[in-house]
């Protein structure tokens, strides 16, 4: 009878927590554990402690987990910490512990039910070997360092996290040290790990692209003279939410007319006019993984001859970069645009040798930014540039030409995966690319 009551309690607890656990599409527990083990292998026998992102102060600022913490755990609640102990001979073995804060039943009436270390089935729900109360974190760290004093110089933390700094100072105090030792930046080894995506990450990136494509097609049907830029952003946002995405990847950019020539214009306050060209850089996150897509469309449904000329040059630059790609050799985001292995060089050379400005000068000076960036949990995933592109990496190719004196800005941005065979896979292949395809999509019902 007692065992039956216990089983019922576990089931009820799981049911009550279902909305929390399935708010995002979780990857397999084995994927998160493999990442934690990979990080441990890069800690040189040290200990890493990472903290979850804090709860936002304002009700209209939705919670978003710290990217590195989410990469390692898939945990999407504030107040948690993760400890990873790197094996070091006979001194210590691999350990992973998730620390959860004490529950606040009063606040849960507003926020919904949370888990803590005493929740039935918490280890299975989190996928971490051990789950303990947050109150035990200082004692666990003290115990490790006391057994191996070398660890005082081998602590890895997030450099900007206040809880991490406080923990290190308190740990030094518990050990009778006059001052806290310097720590290592845990984001450095994590940057290297996050560059190459595993299968479950790629699946989510594809879903983010698919949802973003649906919204971009809605944009193409909606752009017309008399419609505000903000209306277009709003319609795209509605589509993202309908597609199961939690938020835009970044502030949507809908720039019409002269606004199309401002790279990160985000006010979206202008009313679109006949004859405008409209740059729409807008995409969404699906379960924390980002898409980043830009398309340029004519407000009146058809490009003018000059708009089409510049559009075709930008598209040609993107294609030149794609054709130049060689896995393991090509680089992205080389601002000098001189390295023959750089895709930036291939795209820039195309722009600079096709078409002219009104004064007869080459168009190269009207390209204002790098060719692309890494993509993942963050829309600008961490990377050291210029980055050599290898299988499993996901990045953008986004050439652009911005001519203020003609009120013409054109950017075309797609997301690419380097396949296991070294070939590029366009994650946005189902979205119009050419000027003709864009015009046709604008007429679609």
Image: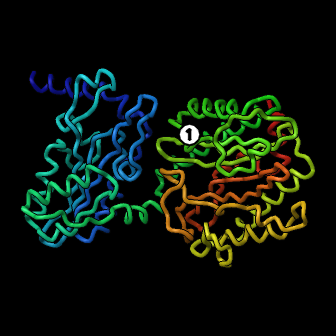
The foreground one among 58 and 193 is 58
Left/right placement of residue 223 relative to residue 330 reads: right
Examine the rendering and report whether any part of residue 332 can be seen: yes
- Give percent across and percent down for residue 190: 39, 61
**Residue at image location 77% in from the left, 29% down from the top:** 227
Please state, as top left, top right, bottom left or bottom right, where the N terminus lies in the image. Answer: top left
The foreground one among 344 and 363 is 363
Vertical arrangement, residue 414 with respect to residue 422, above or below = above
Left/right placement of residue 288 relative to residue 330 reads: left
Residue 9 position by quadrant: top left
- Give percent across and percent down for residue 109: 29, 20
Q: Name the residue that disc number 1 marks.
A: 248
Vertical arrangement, residue 401 with respect to residue 41, above or below = above
Please state, as top left, top right, bottom left or bottom right, where the C terminus lies in the image. Answer: top right
**Residue at image location 64% in from the left, 49% down from the top:** 264
**Residue at image location 14% in from the left, 22% down from the top:** 5
Kindly state the secondary structure of the residue where label 1 is placed. Answer: strand
The foreground one among 275 and 354 is 275
- Give percent across and percent down for residue 47: 22, 62
Q: How many marks?
A: 1
Left/right placement of residue 241 relative to residue 362 reads: left
């Amino acid at each position: 009878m007692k065992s039956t009551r216990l089983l019922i309690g576990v089931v009820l607890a799981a049911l009550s927590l279902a909305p929390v656990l399935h708010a995002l599409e979780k990857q397999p527990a084995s994927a998160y554990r493999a990442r934690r083990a990979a990080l441990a292998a890069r800690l040189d026998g040290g200990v890493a402690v990472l903290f979850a992102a804090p709860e936002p102060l304002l009700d209209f600022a939705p919670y978003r987990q710290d990217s590195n913490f989410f990469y390692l755990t898939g945990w999407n609640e504030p107040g948690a910490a993760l400890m990873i102990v790197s094996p070091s001979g006979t001194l210590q073995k691999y350990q992973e512990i998730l620390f959860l804060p004490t529950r606040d039943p009063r606040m849960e009436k507003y926020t919904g039910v949370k888990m803590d270390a005493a929740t039935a089935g918490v280890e299975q729900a989190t996928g971490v070997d051990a789950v303990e109360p947050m109150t035990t974190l200082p004692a666990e760290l003290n115990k490790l360092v006391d057994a191996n004093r070398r660890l005082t110089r081998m602590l890895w933390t997030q450099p900007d996290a206040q809880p991490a700094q406080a923990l290190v100072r308190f740990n030094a105090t518990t050990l009778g040290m006059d001052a806290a030792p310097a720590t290592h930046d845990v984001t450095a080894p994590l940057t290297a790990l996050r560059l190459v995506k595993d299968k479950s990450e790629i699946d989510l990136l594809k879903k983010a692209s698919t949802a973003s494509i649906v919204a971009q097609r809605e944009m193409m049907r909606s752009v017309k003279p008399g419609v505000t830029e903000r209306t277009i952003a709003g319609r795209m946002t509605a589509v993202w939410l309908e597609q199961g995405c939690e938020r835009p990847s970044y502030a949507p950019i809908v720039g019409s007319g002269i606004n199309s020539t401002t790279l990160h214009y985000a006010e979206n306050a202008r009313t679109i006019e006949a004859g405008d060209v409209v740059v729409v850089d807008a995409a969404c996150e699906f379960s924390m993984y980002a898409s980043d897509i830009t398309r340029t469309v004519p407000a009146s449904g058809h490009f003018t001859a000059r708009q089409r000329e510049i559009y075709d040059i930008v598209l040609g630059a993107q294609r030149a970069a794609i054709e130049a790609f060689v896995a393991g050799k090509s680089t992205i985001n080389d601002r000098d645009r001189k390295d023959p292995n750089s895709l930036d060089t291939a795209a820039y050379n195309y722009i600079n040798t096709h078409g002219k400005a009104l004064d007869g000068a080459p168009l190269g000076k009207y390209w204002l930014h790098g060719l692309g960036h890494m993509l993942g949990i963050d829309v600008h995933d961490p990377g050291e540039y210029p980055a050599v592109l290898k299988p499993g990496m996901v990045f953008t190719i986004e050439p652009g030409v911005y001519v203020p004196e003609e009120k013409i800005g054109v950017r075309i941005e797609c997301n690419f995966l380097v396949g296991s065979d070294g070939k590029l896979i366009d994650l946005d292949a189902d979205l119009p690319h050419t000027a003709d395809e864009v015009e046709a999509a604008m007429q679609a019902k």
